[in-house]
Image: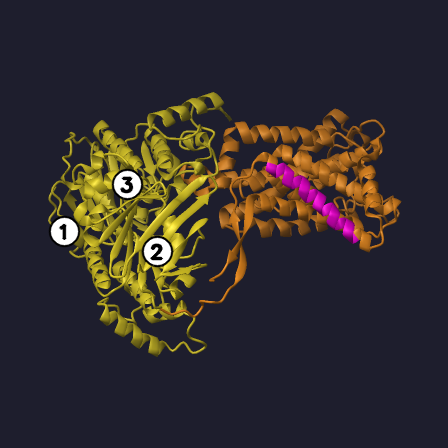
Chain colours: A orange, B yellow
Amino acid sequence: MSSRLAGSLSRSFSIERAPTASRWITALVTVLSFLLALVFGGIVLFLAGENPLEVYAAMFSGAFGDWNGVAETLVKTTPLLLAGLGVAVAFRMQLWNIGAEGQLYWGAIFATGLALFVIPGAPGWVMVPAMVAAGLLGGGLWGLIPGVLRAWFGASEIITSLMLNYVAILFSEYLIHGPWRDPQSFGFPGTPSLPAAGWLAKWGSTRVHLGLLLGLAAALVLWIVLRRTRLGYEIGVMGENPRAALYAGMPTKRMILLVMAISGALAGLAGMSEVAGIGHQLQRNLSPGYGYAAIIVAWLGRLHPFGAVLVAFLLAALTVGGDQIQMSLGLPAAIAPMLQGTILFFLLGGDILTRYRITKVTGVG
Amino acid sequence: MPAVAMRDISKRFGSVVANDHVDFEASWGEVHALIGENGAGKSTLMSILTGLYRPDTGQVEIDGTPVRLRSPRDAITRGLGMVYQHFMLVDPFTVTENVVLGEQRSGIDLQTARVERELATLSERYGLGVDPRARIWQLSVGEQQRVEILRLLYLGARILVFDEPTAVLTPQEAENLIQTLRSMAAQGFSVVFISHKLDEVLEVADRVSVLRRGQIVETTTPAETDRRALARLMVGRELADFVEHPADEPHETVALGETVVELRGVGALGDKGVPGLRNIDLEVRAGETLGIAGVAGNGQRELAEIVTGLRPTTGGAIRIDGKTMTNRPAAEIARAGVAHIPEDRLATGLIGGMDLSDNAILRDYAQPPLCNGSFLSNKAVAAFTDRLIADYDVKAPGRWAMLRTLSGGNQQKLLLARELAGQPRLIVAVHPTRGVDVGASEAIHEALREQRARGAATLLISEDLDEVLALSDRIAVLFDGRVMGIVSARGANVEEIGLLMAGIGSPESDVAIHV
């Protein structure tokens, strides 16, 4: 009997799928991951010469400390939620739509174009619904492109949807520097202001606008569709087992097109609501990456519409709180994103640990 | 001193106890068979033996020395090797190259010439008849299996574990393998033989251990037991299926009806884009079961998929109830009354990550009363699911249970319940009892017999010849995508079917068709 390896002792680790964790364990792990992230971030802050408790307190009060903070958090929640819902519905079907950012821009372009050049004189009760439809249409059509490429040519929607983001953003730049540029803008790139009939209603003196209600309504509708309808069932089967969908005779190509269009439309609505609710014009840096953050919203929300509501709100709070410490404490600009990244990293890590476990493997003794 | 001893082995997966304080020994010079239903813990026990899993309690001793095995590679350095059901061979490589591939002894210079000489010597000494220069794709499945054995011998294995080795073989190849195993034992090797085919076990083994629900319930010798006693030990009760040998079981005569499905000159491509079915002519009539026998990969999958609309044909015509259905969409074929029990239930026919109701409605979810317009009716879905669960005695905590948590047998029963719910005209059943425990397998056979009595046409595709013999009226043998012959199941000659499975005899025309 040969014994070449015998006697050598080695250790290594392997990752195994863990038995399904209970809801309580999942919640506990989430809270612990969050606390751990604060501790880790605190160490870094301490090394940078800051008082971690002071920084965290400033972040918290920035996001929740007064009505203004809460309102700002809700303002940021809106696009994150809408785009996050779009990403979630595609991910449910294992369609990896990374293109929410571009779809958001096209929603904004369609809505702006409609309001400025097609029906500039329309009253609010026509203008706002028409802009909503335009936003949905713009994003939906842009989402359809990777859908068509995937359904008919088998092209990976990850690559195509990502690449189309650059096309969308640059096209919007072209519009605001070129044909749609406001001649009275004194060199600042941007379209003219939308007719006031197209501005979304605001809540009191805050910047919170009707878009938030659109987002919550979209979450509710999506929940019903996924849970109660034939389409929701088909999406679920396609996502869990595409072969079973073929076996059951589902029209899989048509579903890919439909779901990519829905996904893009929701992101487009986010773009429309940013234009009509906040900027009132198409301008540069319309989105600071909402379409990418939407992936995190969808994923941490476990692809559930209400999960997306919760995560979008928390992520928005993190952003607003981060902006706050930059302004009030004069911290370096890199600190806030660093803390945000740390928290997300720990949350995602905790998420993996609830689904898998690490076992120690001891070698030949 | 036993060659290998497993003492007090326990292994749990979550709440499931796969092995419960198992003691198992195999001696030098013996063939020790390990039998048990699916889910009894055989594969877990063997995975522990070969180092894939680590036991929660207990230890493994090889030749009297306690060992802690970390991987199959560790196991082979200890002289213990396993022949899996699916071979780990690289098709375009030669036998020698495949052996060198899995070996660490050689450095940059692979010394293939030396290895080739050693392999030739070993092959001759143990009567394996393997040419070290042959390329794997040129070899039959039986020969490939002998390559696996040769590789283990070359690596120094003295204890050989076989996981259901005859499942992929023709009856003749299985007979040869059994002779090989007997002769290996006679030369002092220790052979562990896992199987659920009781005839085979009684023929090859010196000792038989029966595993039930994670425990060894008995270790005995063939002289002290028989088929029936072993079956009872495996299941824990009497089984109708084992009372008589399946082939001798009388078929109820059902008046044959009109032709339900008809294939004329049908061809199709296989998964690799080469022809997988060539010029197939078959028909099945109402009340008739046509069994399709053959070694795995001879066109069975393609046949099932073209009939159910999952794979396009390259020629010929398929008619169902006289209506041409060639290359029609799967949904339309299903609506024409074709039920499909696919070969791999979790990959195709069921959704592991969804609950029982979601799985129950997969076929009819778009039809009323399950669906009104765009909305599913929760009430109708629940009632439908509960009916399937009750009618087919699916053991589950409730319709909300995740399908994955059910045993293979209960998953298959639910699938069968769903497919048979619409009183299909034609049932395409592929390996309907694969990976299913004996109790569920009996229930599934019974359900298929009832459908036949009701007047359904059945196309039964199975690699288990006993199953084909037990359920069919006629048996068509597939080889290399062709129908080699069609024989009557009553009084069928297993020898003849085996030759057809091996591709001996020219396709159909020259073979006596005795129907």
Q: Chain of mark 2?
A: B
Give the chain letter at badge 1: B
Q: Are marks 3 and 2 on the same chain?
A: yes
Q: Are marks 1 and 2 on the same chain?
A: yes
Contact between marks 3 and 2 (CB within 8 A): the answer is: no
Would you say residue A36 sits in the magenta stretch? yes
According to the picture, the residue beneath numbered tag 3 turns out to be: B234
Kind of residue at badge 1: Glu
Residue at mark 1: B496
- Numbered badge on residue B5: 2
Vertical order, B510 against A68 (above or below): below
- The image shows a total of numbered marks equal to 3
Crowd class of label 1 (few under 14; some 14 to 19; many from 20; radius 10 Å) = some
Q: Identify the secondary structure beneath mark 3.
A: helix
Q: Residue at x 12, y 47 (%)?
A: B493
Residue range in magenta is A25-44
Q: Inspect the image, locate mark 3, and give the three-letter code of the amino acid beneath it.
A: Met
Q: Amino acid at mark 2?
A: Ala
Residue B377 placement (x, y as % from top left): 48, 23
